[in-house]
Amino acid sequence: MIVSDCEVDVPLSNYELLIKPPIQKIVDLAASCDYYAGCDSFGAHLAAKVLTKDRLFIKLSPNFTGWNDWLLRAFLPHPAEDVKEFYRSHIGR
């Protein structure tokens, strides 16, 4: 499942692309997902409430300015050390 605000060219054969889905759809997806891989977003914060740290892969923005209390609180119940582990500078091969 890929959620985007525009068309994307994905080199995969088995996926569904949702463009600007209703927010409730994002909530439902996050609540029922097995893994989360993507950008730091509302969906990532929701997925962090139900997934273990080994199932979260969040892309670190090139504009990242550093860790702060707000960002770390968004990923509770995970401790700060775990949050820093599931952020990645690259997701993929």
Image (cartoon, rainbow, N blue to C red):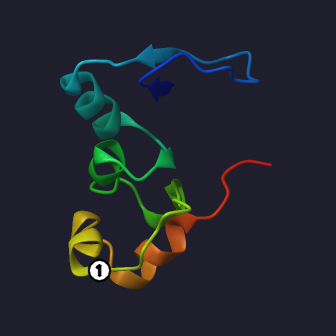
Front position in the image: 9 or 84 = 9
Q: Which residue is mark 1?
A: 68
Residue 38 image offset from top left, x and y in percent: 51, 45
The residue lying at 44 percent from left, 16 percent from top is 18
The residue lying at 56 percent from left, 62 percent from top is 62
Q: Residues within 10 Å of mark 1 (few under 14, many from 20)?
A: few
Front position in the image: 29 or 3 = 3
Residue 91 image offset from top left, x and y in percent: 66, 52
The image quarter containing residue 77 is bottom left
For the image shown, how many numbered marks are present on the structure? Answer: 1
When the figure is inspected, residue 13 is found, relative to residue 92, above or below; the finding is: above
Describe residue 31's horizontal placement relative to residue 88 as left or right.
left
Describe residue 13's horizontal placement relative to residue 8 as left or right.
right
The residue lying at 31 percent from left, 18 percent from top is 21
Please say whether residue 54 is visible from this viewpoint. Answer: yes
Element type where label 1 sits in the image:
loop
Label 1 is placed on what type of residue?
Asn
Describe residue 50's horizontal placement relative to residue 63 as left or right.
left
Please say whether residue 77 is visible from this viewpoint. Answer: no
The image quarter containing residue 48 is bottom left
The residue lying at 80 percent from left, 49 percent from top is 93
Query: Furthest residue to the bottom?
Result: 81
Residue 82 image offset from top left, x and y in percent: 44, 77
When the figure is inspected, residue 46 is found, relative to residue 9, above or below; the finding is: below
